Amino acid sequence: MARDRRLPFLRRGDQHDGPGDRDGQRIASAMEELRHRGKATLHDRLHRVRTAFGLAVQAGLAAGLAYLISHRLLKNPQPVFAPISAVGTLAASVGQRFRRTVELIVGVAVGVLVGDALIYFVGTGAWQLALVVTSAILLSIFAGASVAIVIQAAATAVLIVTLSPSTENLEFPRFIDALLGGGIALLVTAILLPLNPLRVINRAARPALDLLAGQLDACADAVRSRDRDAAQQALFRLRENKEELAALSEAIEGAKETSTLSPARWHRRSELTHYAEAADPIDRAMRNTGTLIRRAVTMIEDSEPVPEPMPDAIGHLAESVRLLRQEFAAGQEPQEARERSLRAVSEAGRAYAEGVGFSGSVVIAQVRTTASDLMVASGIEQEEANRLVRQAFGENRQGEPAARNPAAHPPTAPPVG
């Protein structure tokens, strides 16, 4: 007979009913949730590694090339700053690497100028170093420089003051290394190892769109079962979307930069238009979904009527988000995503006709508004998206909702959006 290896209190829970049994079930449920979280965390970490793998290879190649060229071709005995500037350029926010290269060179120029001038008049030492760094920062800020230029100017000034007495002609190699490192970084990203911009965006878009679709699904289930806590949990999870949206925005900017600088990726420019134009409406869909779920929580709390088509409408929105991601990733026209958005609006129209309360009417309104956002994200003009939403909802030409069932609970506020 196989030995039961479970903990004693879990075995006792199987032997009798009562508090011990309930405790065992709760603990088992908690352990299952912890295992699920562990798997999710591992999945998230592996996704981040896959997303950053291309950047890591680019940075390694750029650093190695910068060191090799500076040391072997330019005869720099200590080529430290060239690989540092290469990695610094690649570590900049994606989509701002050309700007970072310019900032490196400008920052070096300011630091050398201030450092040399003050060393000539006041010499070197601790208080001279403090004066040089302060002057470099204030001069950069006065000129309206960015934070990156200010930091680079201060760092260069420190090197000039501390190393100039022992290292001759430091200024010129510093200029060359800044130019070399930034140039090598751009060469790697544009010519030698350009990433596929669509693949980068697809990987960045997946967490944001999966989060949106997942919480819409959770909200639909919560509304269907009138589970107020589940709806509130979906709202909490959706609000933690800043990292996903920031990653998507950065990926879009990086894809634009790659498709501009890399001849091998020029043919991708038109395909990037979908994502570039979709970023803002996806952000709006996130915010409008937050309002939808928040009012769904209130609707459940107030025991308002929940017509059967209402959770179906929310579920169709979730499916529309998933279809949008899939069709974008495949480079297809998002026809199925549009159709599913309009189906969500149609179900919302049926729910409204059956009768809803005040918070229910807001949920209906947010279904319409979110569907309109998703339609715009799919490439439909805002005015056309609004017209299609009104048509799918069942409004007449004067913009009035279709006739309601007289026996149904009347809504206390008309839907908007």
Image (cartoon, helix red, strand yellow):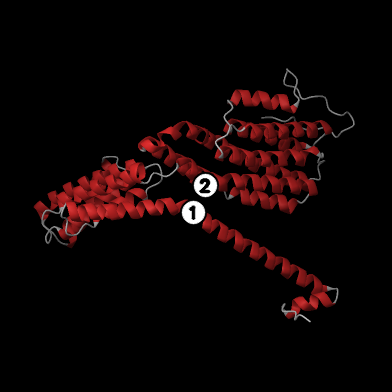
Residue drawn at x 41%, y 37% is 265
Using the image, determine if residue 338 lies above or below residue 23: above
Place of residue 246 in the rendered image (x, y in percent of width and height, measured from the top left): 49, 45
- Look at 15% across and 61% down and name the residue there: 125
Work out whether residue 336 or residue 103 is closer to the camera in this orientation and state it.
336
Dot 1 amino acid type? Arg
Residue 404: x %, y % from top left: 84, 28
Q: Badge 2: how crowded within 10 Å, few (<14), some, or many (20+)?
A: some
In the rendered view of the protein, which quadrant contains the C terminus? top right
Task: Say above or below: 5 vs 180.
Answer: below
The answer to whether residue 107 is above or below residue 352 is below
Q: In the image, residue 100 lies at what x, y percent?
A: 32, 44
Residue 103 placement, left or right of 1: left
Q: Earlier in the sequence, mark 1 or mark 2?
A: 1
Q: Residues within 10 Å of mark 1 (few under 14, many from 20)?
A: few
Disc 2 secondary structure class: helix
Front residue of this view, candidates 226 and 203: 203
Q: In which quadrant will I find the N terminus? A: bottom right
Which residue is at a point 72% across and 66% down the rendered structure image? 29
Residue at mark 1: 50
Q: Is residue 366 left or right of residue 327?
A: right
